[in-house]
């Protein structure tokens, strides 16, 4: 998952919204940790479950990473407004875990990543990913670099 995040980071730029879905323990935060490494941001990328959002500034000239965990939020975009994601989005890469039904209105362009962990997998090693680009930004993007 971490390596996939590093590969995905090569496709991302300021203004990109990435929505991550998957059951608890599927690897959403591990994927985001790899994104942070690939983007070259400051700070350890950890689950923002209890603080809801963390901003990781770039160590270079790339965009900062805004990492949001919407698991504890029950409302839609209205509840997310306090996070000012609409203000952060143009200059940052915004990654939202558990964002379905909550952040789609932020932009017409987004990358949706659904992570499936194999049922009965006791090693936590096997994952299946579905990556879907939505909107003009992703219409011509080559997502094949994500294939393992």
Image (cartoon, grey):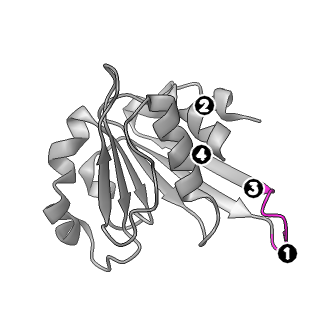
Q: Of callouts 4 and 2, which one flags the residue occurring earlier in the amino acid sequence?
A: 2
Vertical comparison of 130 with 79: above or below: above
Q: Mark 1 or mark 3, which has the lower sequence index?
A: 1
Check whether the beta carbons of the residues at disc 1 and disc 3 lie within 8 A of each other.
Answer: no
Circle 4 — which element? strand
Q: Earlier in the sequence, mark 1 or mark 2?
A: 2
Disc 1 and disc 3: Cα gap in Å?
Answer: 12 Å
Question: Image quarter for residue 7?
Answer: top right
* x and y percentages locating residue 61 in the rendered image: 31, 19
SS category of the residue bearing label 1: loop
Q: Residue at x 40, y 69 (%)?
A: 49
Assign a secondary structure to mark 3. strand
Residue on which disc 4 sits? 131
Of 61 and 24, which appears nearest the observer? 61
Determine the residue positioned at 58% across, 52% down: 30
Magenta span: predominant SS is loop
Q: Which mark is residue 7?
A: 2
Secondary element under disc 2, as helix, strand or loop, is helix
- Horizontally, residue 22 falls left or right of residue 104, namely right
Categorize mark 1 by other alpha carbons within 10 Å: few (<14), some (14-19), many (20+): few
Tell me the CA gap for discs 3 and 4: 13 Å
């Amino acid at each position: 998952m971490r390596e996939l995040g590093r590969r995905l980071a090569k496709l991302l730029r300021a203004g990109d919204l990435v929505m991550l879905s998957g059951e608890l323990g599927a690897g959403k935060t591990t994927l985001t940790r790899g994104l942070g490494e690939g983007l070259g941001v400051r700070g350890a990328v950890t689950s923002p479950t209890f603080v809801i959002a963390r901003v990781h500034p770039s160590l270079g000239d790339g965009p900062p990473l805004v990492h949001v965990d919407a698991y504890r939020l029950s409302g839609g975009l209205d509840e997310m407004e306090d996070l000012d994601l609409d203000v952060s989005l143009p200059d940052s890469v915004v990654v939202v875990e558990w964002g379905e039904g909550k952040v789609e209105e932020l932009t017409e362009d987004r990358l949706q990543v659904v992570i499936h962990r194999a049922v009965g997998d006791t090693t936590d090693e096997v994952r299946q990913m579905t990556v879907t680009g939505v909107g003009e930004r992703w219409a011509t993007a080559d997502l094949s670099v994500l294939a393992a």
